[in-house]
Image: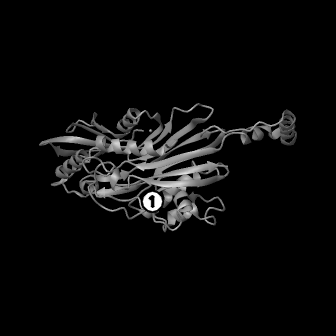
Amino acid sequence: MFRTFSGGTLPPRRFRHRPLFAALAAVLSVFALAGPGAPNAVSAAQPPATLRAMTRNLYWGADLAPVFQADQAHLLGAVGAAFENVRRTDFPERAEALADEIAGLDPHVVGLQEAALWRSGPHESAPATHVEYDFLATLLGKLADRGLHYRAAVVVSDGDYEAPGTVDGQVRDIRLTDRDALLVRTDLPANVFSVGGTRGERFRRNLVLNSQVLGSVPLLRGWVDADVTLHGRTFRVVSTHLENLDAAVRQAQAEELLAGPLADRARPSVLLGDLNTTPDSATYHRLTDPVARGGAAFTDVWNARHPGALGPTCCRTPDLRSGELTLRLDYVFFRGPFRALAADRSGEAAADRTPSGLWPSDHAGVRGVLQLR
């Protein structure tokens, strides 16, 4: 029996001294010119709002296609093999490498995809509740071990699936809850960095897989967002994980973002995520083409800083022992008065592998450094 559940989540500026009269004249002229717009004069004196934003797919730990494709005779083995691969890809070990990436790149915000929660329980006693791996809690713990201060500002539970499998010679129910999350810094003063207006939702349009054993299984995906204020400038950050198996569904999910959390074209916005779309695809074109977006297009920070460079981010083999990155699927996009200062990948070099030889994920991460003008 297969079950799905419908539940849930800068350095300081240096000033030179000026004669008192000149300084006073400058202040008076600002207020005389600003009038009702005086708050803008205050914000203009703020330090530059330079945002470091990162997207990171954590990888569930297994390829689930054999589970969905299994017939009745092979379902227990397929589920058991998938969970054994989760064990072998050892998220606690990988989380050390992932935390090192975040420590090195020092982002203000991190969009996470496939922040899996794996649970088990006795067969046919759903829902399984014994936590085997909580990727989100583990990663936050590894960050704290390094003296880094992050919290999950918002989490959304996407798909929540349970099926029986043979584990350690016994039939047990194995449950996967797929989650998207937005991590944010907590160690900065509120007048420097603050986060509010958080939301997390599933998409209305999702792919439904049909299996002779599992029946109709909706592959639920979603998004999270927050209003971020950095040095007095407020903008929206959205993180998502779009469908990978069906281009029409993926396009529909992108349209939901554009009509939902990204609908306000006047608001500066940053879009993070594993978009499962390549730079030559219709979905990428829809997001980044000024004509398609009526002049309110997003800019791909990687292209802005590395024009013509492929910058692949996907995909390693399911065992995380081999495989080359050949596709660019993970992005930091921006819209509004930002300037792209830098774009980096993480977890793509041989030196990033764990002591046992695991890649941190089947994807590489991407960081963008953006200055809001």
Residue 36 percent coordinates (x, y): 83, 38
Numbered disc total: 1
Residue 361 appears in the rendering:
no
Q: Is residue 262 left or right of residue 161?
A: right
**Vertical side of 59 occupied by 156: above or below:** above
> Between residues 357 and 297, which one lies in front from this camera angle?
357
Residue at 64% x, 38% y: name it. Answer: 231
Is residue 64 placed above or below 125 in the rendered structure?
Answer: below
Which residue shows up at 66% across the image and 42% down it?
233
Q: Of the residues shown, which amino acid type is indicated by label 1?
A: Val
User: Closer to the camera, 189 or 205?
Assistant: 189
Q: Residues within 10 Å of mark 1 (few under 14, many from 20)?
A: some
Q: Residue at x 58, y 59 (%)?
A: 299
| Residue 27 x/y as whole percent | 83, 36
Q: Secondary structure at mark 1?
A: helix
Left or right of 350? Residue 259 is right
Front-most of residues 347 and 282: 347
Spot occupied by residue 15 in the image (x, y as percentages of width and height): 72, 38
Residue that protrudes farthest toward the left in the picture: 169
Whole-percent x and y of residue 312? 42, 62
> Is 249 on the left-hand or right-hand side of 5?
right
Look at the picture and state if 20 lies above or below 164.
above
- Image position of 291 with respect to 133: above or below: below
- Give residue 50's quadrant in the image: top right
* Circle 1 residue: 249
- How are the colours assigned in the image? one colour
